[in-house]
Amino acid sequence: MYLGKIIRIQPESLAEELGLAVGDKVLEVNGQKLRDIIDLSFSFADEEIDLLIEHEDGEQEMISFDKDYDEELGAEFESAVFDGIRKCANNCCFCFVNMTAPNMRESLSVKDDDYRMSFLYGNFITMTNMVEADFRRIEQFHLSPLFVSVQAMNPALRAEMLRCKRAADIAGQLDRLEAAGADYHTQVVLCAGLNDGAELERTIRELSERRPHVLSVAIVPVGITKHRRDPYPIRQFDLAGAGEVIDQVSAWQEKSRRETGSTFFYLGDEFYFLAGRELPSEEEYDGFPQLDNGIGLTRNFLCEWEKEGLGKDRSRQQPVRLDVISGTSVAPVLERLAGKAMEQQEDLHVRVIPVPNRYFGETVNVSGLLTGRDILLTLKEIKGERDGILIPESALRAGEDVFLDDYSLKELCEAFPKTRIEPVKSGRDYYRALHDWENYRKERSGETDYMWQSNAGYTKY
């Protein structure tokens, strides 16, 4: 049976008016069994509704009512899919989930490859587990855009990297997706000496030829943790290799801008950090179409900082000593911004503290994969007084004050009882925290950042 379990009721909503409660399960709307939030959305568009509910005690109830065409139920569900998430059929040589630490919570080991999650959340799919009925449903409900993990357009290489025979039919699967009327963003996880160089050239060329169905191409470097046990040889990029990738892709970016006015091909921030190169300008990101994938995250952060500071007076404040926690890759950027803030406020003292990732290994250098205990250990090693600590909100689980290692924000605060700890999500937050620490408070309720582990926690309707 398909079950849509309610975990939250919005105040003054239709769900509240109908007497629905947390724990109730939505089974059918007007006789239609619901596979997911997509079915619910389309079936709930009718103005006369027969809603079949199963209460926590197992009793079922049919609730009939009239509603406005565009009126929503006002409930949040445990999952976007009611019939179980579609699992990944591959065994990718670069799979980050396979490189997580042992005994981590179960949700961090779920490898979804579900086209519905792609449409709803922007999760990347390989399409190796899709059947004709899935493409028909995409066409029927106009599920577009989707997000496709390509890796390589060379059929044999893609099958080798994904270790799945069906992965070789990437061209045929994209053809079928386009025939269903769907547009899509794409991603290439780049491994040094494997799908870069001439293979990357082929992938870029063939994806470029699929415009306008292809909306963007993101190229991100492979990440490797110390927990990887897979014998398949993959390598990360060094300074020289990252520079070669930037030069290769830059030629295609310039060609695309000349011909279409859009960059179209976007590199992950890590390539620029590795190569010691300047980030592209805001205009070159074309509105940041793959921001949730980390593409242009740093440039967007800088833009938010600058816009927040436009035309604002720098208020005087009491002497403030702040420690700023970050991953090692972005620490130099945060240090430059902190330097600007300290130039404007002589009583502001900021230490940017890059935290080595002991949990996943120090080759993992992004802020979003820092754990609570690594942050705690690093802070304990840093002597001196501090009035406040800023931590990256991306390191906390979406909707919860818990780090990836299940260490809680509450526990971190208890370890520093005399120091206020505040999360920072955006450049706007960072600016406000440094320029107005006394009044800065980060409100996290309702924020649902994309989670690195790929499976979304819940959805709203």
Image (tube, helix red, strand yellow):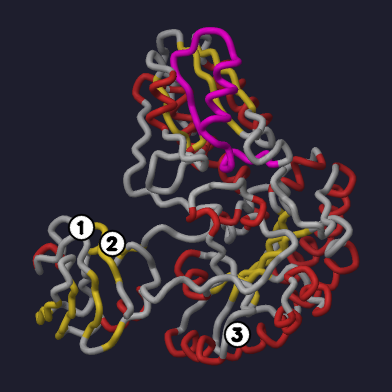
Residue drawn 55% across and 47% down? Answer: 103
Q: Left or right of 454: which side holds 96?
A: right
Q: Is residue 204 visible?
A: no
Mark linked to residue 10: 1
Characterize the local packing of mark 3: few (<14), some (14-19) or many (20 or more) Cα atoms within 10 angstroms. Answer: many
Task: Please give the label number shown on residue 177.
Answer: 3
Residue topped by disc 2: 76
Q: Is residue 191 above or below residue 144?
A: above
Q: Which mark is first along the chain, 2 or 1?
A: 1
Q: Position of residue 360 (x, y in %)?
A: 65, 41
Q: Which residues are magenta?
A: 364-391
Q: Rounded to the nearest whole Å, what is the CA distance between mark 1 and mark 3?
A: 36 Å
Q: Quadrant of the N terminus?
A: bottom left
Residue 386 shown in magenta: yes
Looking at numbered disc 3 in the image, what kind of residue is underneath it?
Answer: Leu
Q: Magenta stretch containing residue 250, yes or no? A: no
